[in-house]
């Protein structure tokens, strides 16, 4: 997936910050902020490893679970017309609305 990097089993989103001329990485799925900056891919990997290690060490020290746990449920707010169209699409495919959304997410996440 574009703009994603995996470091030691944890995924981070990567964006370019034109104000400082550097790339910014931010780990996703953690119970706190762990971001890092660099001007190259190699630098991002190195800084990301350092940032992640510091974050995980801090969590261990404080007895905090470092990884977020998700329930598998979330609400989506759509305009009524989009909701109706989604129901039509699910019905046409013979699946539930939940399955339609799950399939769509799997398709875009590669």
Image (cartoon, rainbow, N blue to C red):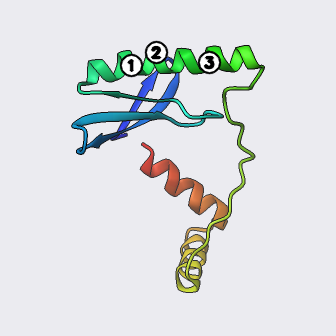
Residue appearing at x 72%, y 14% in the figure: 61
Q: Which of the numbered marks, if any, corresponds to residue 56?
A: 3
Describe the element under mark 2 as helix, strand or loop: helix
**Mark 2–mark 3 contact, CB under 8 Å?**
no
Q: Position of residue 54 (x, y in %)?
A: 55, 16
Image position of 104 with respect to 97: above or below: above
Q: CA distance from mark 1 to mark 3?
A: 14 Å
Q: Position of residue 47 (x, y in %)?
A: 39, 19
Q: Is residue 26 shown left or right of residue 44?
A: right
Label 2: how many Cα within 10 Å (few below 14, some 14–19, many 20+)? some
Q: Quadrant of the C terminus?
A: top left
Image position of 106 with respect to 59: above or below: below
Residue appearing at x 35%, y 29% in the figure: 37
Which residue in the protein does label 1 denote? Answer: 47
Q: CA distance from mark 2 to mark 1?
A: 5 Å
**Mark 2–mark 1 contact, CB under 8 Å?**
yes
Describe the element under mark 3 as helix, strand or loop: helix
Q: CA distance from mark 2 to mark 3?
A: 10 Å
């Amino acid at each position: 997936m574009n703009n994603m990097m995996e470091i030691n089993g944890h995924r981070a989103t990567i964006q370019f910050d034109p104000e400082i001329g550097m790339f910014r990485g931010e780990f996703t799925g953690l119970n706190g902020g762990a971001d890092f900056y660099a001007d190259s891919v190699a630098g991002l990997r190195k800084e990301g490893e350092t940032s992640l290690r510091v974050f995980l060490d801090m969590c261990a020290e404080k007895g905090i679970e470092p990884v977020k746990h998700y329930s598998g449920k979330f609400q989506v707010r759509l305009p009524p017309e989009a909701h109706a169209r989604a129901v039509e699409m699910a019905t046409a495919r013979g699946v539930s609305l939940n399955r339609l959304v799950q399939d769509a997410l799997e398709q875009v996440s590669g």
